[in-house]
Amino acid sequence: MIYSKGLYTMKNEIRNELNLQINREMQSAYNYLGIATWCSEKGYPGSAHWFSLQAKEEMEHALKIYKYLLDRGETPTLESVGKPKAAFEDLRSTFEAALEQEREVENFLNAISVKAAEAKDHVTLNFLAWFLEEQVEEVASVQTILDQLSLAKDSLFLVDQELGKRTETESAGN
Ligand code: MG
């Protein structure tokens, strides 16, 4: 897109940060797909379903940033995605890994928001607000699952069955 440069020209630093975030979201998607594969193999189809939908959401997050860069007249740079972890100790450790990942993503999004504020890039700041809100939900939902797993102890089957009922959310896209 030919974009007339002016008030809304994006600073290089912000563009680079958003490029990195595209990569992090894709890496998250891949990591979740890796967990989903482990869950399928170990006989947790509900959790596999939950993690595969989570992977899809992360890809949608990546695409949302990708589209934002294009809309601002910038060219996204796509970096390589690393191999995801394939082995886990037990079901609980997969959700612990998810929680750690979401907290990490939250920290990065917050750091980019700080930089956008410093650069007086209010358009990007506004764009990132959706992601920060989304992170609050993501962290809370994984935490809730971990709580359920603690309560369920030997009834992992029931928790897994519940996770199998997850439906796609509309908010992930636009
Ligand atoms: Mg995400």
Image (tube, grey):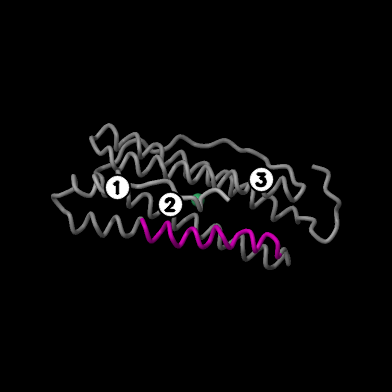
Q: Main secondary structure of the magenta part?
A: helix
Mark 3 secondary-structure assignment: helix
Q: CA distance from mark 3 to mark 2?
A: 23 Å
- Residue positioned 64% across, 47% down in the render: 19
User: Which residue lies most toward the top here?
Assistant: 41
Check disc 2: other Cα within 10 Å, few if <14, some if 14-19, many if 20+. Answer: some
x, y percent for residue 152: 17, 54
x, y percent for residue 120: 73, 67
x, y percent for residue 88: 29, 41
Q: Which residues are magenta?
A: 122-141
Q: CA distance from mark 2 to mark 1?
A: 19 Å
With 105 as the anchor, is 8 left or right in this view?
Answer: right
Q: Is mark 2 within 8 Å of ligand 1?
A: no
Residue tagged by mark 1?
Answer: 163
Residue tagged by mark 2?
Answer: 101
- Residue positioned 67% across, 49% down in the render: 68
Observer-nearest of 159 and 32? 159
x, y percent for residue 34: 39, 37
Mark 2 secondary-structure assignment: helix
**Comes first in the chain, label 3 or label 2:** 3
- For the residues carrying marks 2 and 1, which lies nearer the camera in this image? 1
With 156 as the anchor, is 167 left or right in this view?
Answer: right
Mark 1 secondary-structure assignment: helix
Which quadrant does the N terminus fall into? Answer: top right
**Comes first in the chain, label 2 or label 1:** 2
Check disc 3: other Cα within 10 Å, few if <14, some if 14-19, many if 20+. Answer: some
Q: CA distance from mark 1 to mark 3?
A: 31 Å
Q: Is mark 1 within 8 Å of ligand 1?
A: no
Residue tagged by mark 3?
Answer: 67
With 126 as the anchor, is 88 left or right in this view?
Answer: left
Up-down relation of residue 103 to residue 52 (above or below)? below
Observer-nearest of 75 and 86? 75
